[in-house]
């Protein structure tokens, strides 16, 4: 997939990989990861494929997240190009989203539509806790890089991707690490909201002046 020079071929290959993951998820993800060299930043298309698998087939991705995080997290500090930061950030958000979806599906399968009792709530919580224990530290490490450094990017598209991904990542990162950054996270999102509101107000004023003119 990464060796072909034609961008359209690579794009179609990503779509094929995602389609295959719905039938043979484990095999598809493992084969995709063979094209992700350890300790090196992979092709944009490899990250795109992993991100799309997580979005369309979350259960398949969650089963392989340990292997994925082992390769993704160590290279985050070496990523310089905004386009790579953007696709990796999107992927991290989708990995977190897949975990959230998996927790939700586990609860539905276990308890159906019936109201949860005390023991059932405990069982469901344990399922979530097991996932946090397994992946929470990796998510927290990735969050540190993305939230601390990449949210300050000049590119609006990247900042938006960071805001969306970090919101999802806070739900599945290690609870202790989330608590240490809670105030900082809250301040950052409030600041982003105020800036957006200010821009919208400014644009409305400019529009009104244009109409009056």
Image (cartoon, helix red, strand yellow):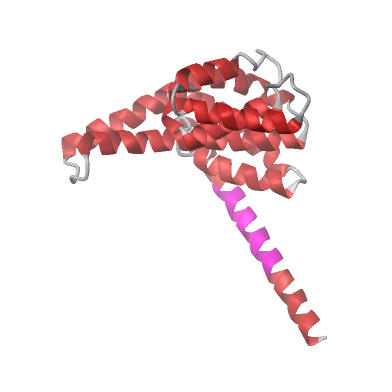
- Work out which quarter of the rendered image holds the N terminus and state it: top right
Instruction: Judge whether residue 59 is colored magenta.
Output: no
Residue 188 in the figure: left or right of residue 134:
right
Q: Is residue 26 above or below residue 124?
A: above
Indicate the quadrant where residue 158 lies. top right
The tally of labels here is 0
Indicate the quadrant where residue 208 lies. bottom right
**Chief secondary structure of the magenta span?**
helix
**Residue shown at 56% from the left, 26% from the top:** 17
Nearer to us in this view, 122 or 113: 113
The percent coordinates of residue 108 (x first, y second) are 27, 39
Nearer to us in this view, 2 or 142: 2
**Residue shown at 60% from the left, 29% from the top:** 49
**Residue shown at 65% from the left, 17% from the top:** 36
- Work out which quarter of the rendered image holds the C terminus and state it: bottom right
Q: Inspect this view and state whether residue 140 appears.
A: no
Q: Inspect this view and state whether residue 10 appears.
A: yes
Q: Is residue 96 above or below residue 193?
A: above
Q: Is residue 203 above or below residue 15?
A: below
The percent coordinates of residue 35 (x first, y second) are 65, 16
**Residue shown at 17% from the left, 39% from the top:** 118
The percent coordinates of residue 141 (x first, y second) are 57, 27
Nearer to us in this view, 202 or 42: 42
Residue 202 in the figure: left or right of residue 141:
right
The percent coordinates of residue 95 (x first, y second) are 51, 32
Identify the residue at the far bottom of this view. 212
Nearer to us in this view, 196 or 108: 108
Instruction: Judge whether residue 198 is colored magenta.
Output: yes
The stretch in magenta equals 186-200
């Amino acid at each position: 997939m990464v060796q072909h020079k034609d961008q359209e071929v690579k794009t179609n290959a990503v779509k094929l990989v995602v389609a295959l993951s719905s039938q043979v998820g484990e095999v598809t993800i493992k084969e995709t990861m063979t094209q992700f060299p350890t300790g090196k930043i992979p092709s944009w298309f490899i990250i795109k494929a992993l991100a799309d698998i997580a979005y369309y087939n979350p259960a398949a991705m969650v089963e392989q997240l340990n292997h994925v995080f082992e390769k993704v997290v160590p290279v985050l500090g070496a990523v310089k190009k905004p386009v790579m930061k953007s696709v990796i950030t999107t992927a991290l958000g989708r990995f977190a989203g897949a975990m959230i979806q998996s927790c939700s599906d586990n609860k539905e399968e276990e308890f159906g539509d019936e109201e949860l009792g005390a023991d059932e709530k405990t069982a469901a919580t344990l399922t979530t806790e097991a996932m946090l224990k397994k992946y929470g530290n990796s998510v927290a490490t990735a969050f540190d890089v993305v939230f601390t450094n990449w949210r300050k990017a000049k590119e609006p598209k990247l900042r938006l991707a960071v805001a969306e991904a970090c919101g999802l990542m806070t739900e599945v990162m290690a609870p202790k690490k989330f608590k240490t950054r809670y105030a900082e996270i809250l301040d950052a999102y409030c600041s982003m909201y105020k800036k957006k509101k200010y821009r919208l107000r400014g644009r409305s004023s400019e529009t009104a002046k244009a109409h009056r003119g």
